Structures are given as C-alpha cells and as structure tokens.
Amino acid sequence: MISDIRKLVGNDRKKLRKPIVLLTLDTLFNMLSYGMMYAVLLDLINDNLTYSKIRTYSIILIIAFCARAFINSKGYTGIQEQGARAVENMRITLGDHVRNINLGFFNKNSIGNLSNILTNDLQDFEKIITHNTSDLIKTVLLSTYLLIITFFIDTQLGLIQLAAILIAVPIILYGGKKVACIGKHKKVVMNEVISRMVEYLSGIQVFKSHNLVGEKFERLEKSFRDLKKESIRTEVSIVPYVLAFQVIVDISFPILLLIATTKFGASVIDKKEFLTFIIINIALTNVLRAFAAQYGEFRYLKLATKKLIETYNKKEMPYRYEDVEFNNYNIEFDNVSFEYEEGENTINHLNFKAKEGTMTALIGPSGSGKTTVTSLIARFWDVDNGMIKIGGKNIKDIKPDTLLNHVSMVFQDVYLLHDTIYNNIRLGKQDATREEVIRAAKIANCHEFIDSLSNKYDTIVGEGGSTLSGGEKQRISIARAILKDAPIILLDEATASLDADNELEIRKSIKKLTANKTVIVIAHRLNTIKDADQIIVLNEGTVEEKGKHSVLMKNKKRYYNMYNEMENAKKWAI
C-alpha cells in the first residue's frame, strides 16, 4: 500500500513524512499514561507511594499531555493539509491525464464510473492518506513495541501472546478480502447510481412528458435500492471477522493472566515483571481491538487506490513535438484507415486533400465516417494506418493541445458552462479583453440579443445553455470560435436543426468565421455547400465521389440522387 501511495502522490510524499512521524510519536507519548499507572501500582505494592511521588507523576503526565497536544496538533494539521494538497495536485494531474487519453476511454467507461473515479475515489484516497495509513502505522508499531516488551518479561508469555495474534490476524485479513470483494460490487452499483442520476436530470423534460418522474422512473429507483443493499452488505460483511478477531484477543488476556499468575506464584517472574505484564497486555489488547476496526475500512478504501492507478496507467496519446510551426494549413488524408472496435472498418484507405483557405464539405449517409474524419483531424482518436498531415507534418507527432490551438470546432450540440455569457465566449481565448469578446459577439451576430438581456454579458447561462434558445447558443459558440481565430475550422452543419430566421443569422456568422480559413464542414443540407471548393461523398468510410457541385451533378451518381431527393422534398406539403 505504501508503494501505491508513493506512486500516486509523487514528490508530495516527502511532505507527508513529517506529520506521519509526529502522529506515530504521539502514540509513544500515550504510553506514558500506562507507565505512570505502572509506577503508582508498584509503589502501592512496595508501600512506597507518597504525596511527593504522586505530584511528580502528575507533573510528568501534564507534561506528556501538553507534548501530545502539541505533537498531535502539528501532526494532525500537517497530515490534513499535506494530504489535501497532494490530492488537489492529483485532481489536476489526473484531469490532465484523462483528457490526453483518446475518446475510446470515455466510450468504454460510463459517466458514473468516470465521475466516481474523479470524485469519490479521490476522496477515499485522501482519507487513506489523512487517516487510515497513519492510524495503521501507529497500530502496527505500537503492537510490535508492546509484544517485544512481553518477550523481555518472559519468553513463554511472549510466545503465547504471539500465537494468539497469529491465529487472529488471518481471520481479519480474510475479512478484509471479503470487504474488498463486496466493495467492488458496491462501487459498480455507485457508478450506476451516478449514471442514472445524470440521465434523469438530463432527460427530465422527456420523462415529465411521459409521466415518468419520481418513483415512476424505475431505473433510478432500482439503482438506489441496489446501492442500499450493497452498502449494507459491505458494512455487515466485516462484522463476523472483527468479532472473531476481538474474541480471540479478549480471551487471550485472561489465559495469559492465569499463566502469568502461576509463574508469579512459582517465583519464575517477580512482582515487578508481573505488574508490567498486566499493564502491557491491557494496552496491547486495546490496540489490537482498534486494529480490527481500522483494517476493514482500510481494505474498502484501498479499492479507490487500485482504480486510480489503473486510470493513471491508461496510455496517453503519444507525440514528439511540444510546439510546432506550420508552413501552411493544407490538410491531407494519406491512405488513412481507422476502426473504433476491432473488425469494424469505420474509415478505410481514405485519401483526400483540403487546401489552405478552401472549404471542403463531407456528405454521405449515416455511419459513412463524416464525424470520424473531423475527430481524427482534432486527434480525439489516432489513425490505425496511414497518416493525416497538416502543412506536411504528421499530426501524430504533435502534442494534442498544441494541435488544437490551431483548430476551432463548431458542432450542432453546443455545450455552455453555468457561467456568464462573457466567460462562455472567452473560453475561445482565456486572455481576451472585454473589447475583444464584444467584437467577436458582434461578428457572430449575437451582440444584439446579449445587449437586450438585463445583465447583458454578465448574464448567467443555465448549465449546458438551458436558459438560451438553440440559435442563441449556436451564435455564442461561433463567437467563441471567432475569438479563438484558429486557421482550421471544423463544422458539423450548425444550422441543421434551426428555424429559418435563426438559420439565416447563423449562416451570416459562419461566413464571417470561415473567411480565409481551411474549413471542413459536415453537410446535412446540400444546398448549404453548393459553393464549397470541394465536396467529398463518403460511403462506408471511403471516398465514393469528389469534386465541385457542378461536376458531381454531371456525374449523376450518389450526390446527384441525394441532391434531387432534397429538392423534391421541398415540394412536399401536408
């Protein structure tokens, strides 16, 4: 476990040493109370107890108490502060690590699992650092210390005490395994609860419309019932083993006391050793009982450590260059193949070139690979074979963050933060001035509606943009992209789900956004890309047709048929 903590906290582990040592030292000072009790009893037996001695013992205890208070405050404050700081750094590094893993990691892990790792597991790990590890170290050291003293008093008594511990420890260790096994199920159920809660809150409009709120939303109700069941199982699972451990420890005390009394009666040990043994054995019994309770919780919390290490071990997307300068922004797909899952050829030997300053439109049936092309350009995924080049440079050699500095993306599904409109636009350029934000909003044709709001640019947007219309959200996302001013623009037809008035406004915004940029647009309405410099018709991950609108119409193939179907659809009436 210590090696796991060292691996996770990195250099922060050095800052944890001092508070752990102080907390361990506090335990040794705690033994002084037993020492004073021993001295008092010894003086009583020898009829040597005086007021002067009582005063001396009391002063020693007061000094020990003050020393404990100082050491404990420093140690406890230090472990809390440094533990929290270490976990704070972990949250940042883990977040950075996760965002550098390809999107397959997110597809294979539910939102509940990811949320659990980034919140509950980190919280559990913090508890391991700030409480459990130091407590267990103190318990183990103190138990060892007390056991060694028992051996010095009498070897036979020490061996019997050791035998009792060796019988009891495997029981509690097995109980810990049981807790860990059941705890895994609890964490899976917790993942499900978080996923169902997110699902419920995200789809509340749909569920209300179908009268599926509250207890009627069985999926959420079932996940809560399962969590209750697994939580009880986890808590109860360790109880029989803790009780068995404590029974063995408790029974060993009267047995050892009987043997020690016999030895004292036979003059094998003197009254001083006999009294020492009684006090030491009482202390050891209490320490071992505490260990039984701590260990079960420790094994459950340790599951978080395993999950965190597994997440850190996920490979980040490789790169060779931190920074790069492009000679131009031509985008080239050179014999590119890619599959999300083995045996599923999403992109198959794809070849095309999008020249700098031109617009390339991608069209094709659902599942033809349009969105995958834009995801590969942004390095959300890496190609399996072939090469994607920007300005002649293989994007696999470029750090993903650096690459995305040169790319702006505007898609149909716009996500806005629960923050001001100003801060939502400023996401495109964190150091932008207010004047730059307002200028971008004006270019994106959203300044007018923002200015009409009561708090203007300081208006708080609901989570996900829930307080704004689809057209308003889309224009803010375009303002964000305009502010970023990246030379490559990736567009998933941003007007596909908008009404006529909003569509016109968005088209104006997009025209300003894409001026003199290298643009890749996924087209759903073919009339919006008639003027594109290049139209690529995709089918099953390959290029079926390529050319300008006029050329493709003359070819009378898939594009021609799709375009005519769209034109005929305009004549439909109900």
Image (cartoon, rainbow, N blue to C red):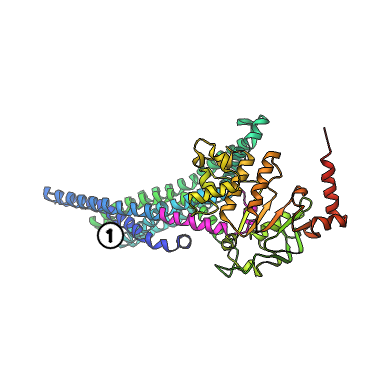
Residue 289 percent location from the top left of the image:
39, 49
Residue 423 percent location from the top left of the image:
51, 47
Up/down of 497 relative to 395, above or below: above
Q: Nearer the viewer, residue 559 or 513?
A: 513
Locate the C terminus by quadrant. Answer: top right
Up/down of 2 relative to 253, above or below: below
Q: Residue at x 21, y 50 (%)?
A: 61
Q: Residue at x 38, y 53 (%)?
A: 135
Q: Residue furthest top?
A: 211
Q: Mark 1, residues whose alpha carbon is within 10 Å: few (<14), some, or many (≥20)? A: some
Q: Nearer the viewer, residue 204 or 56?
A: 204
Q: Is residue 241 left or right of residue 513?
A: left
Name the quadrant containing residue 82: bottom left
Residue labelled with disc 1:
268
273 in magenta: no
**What residue span does the magenta drawing correspond to?**
84-112
Q: Is residue 28 left or right of residue 201?
A: left
- SS for dot 1: loop
Q: Residue at x 49, y 37 (%)?
A: 455
Q: Is residue 210 left or right of residue 308?
A: right
101 in magenta: yes
User: What amino acid is found at the position of numbered circle 1 in the picture?
Assistant: Val
Residue 217 percent location from the top left of the image:
64, 33
Residue 489 visible, this orientation? yes
Q: Nearer the viewer, residue 8 or 409?
A: 409
Residue 152 percent location from the top left of the image:
30, 62
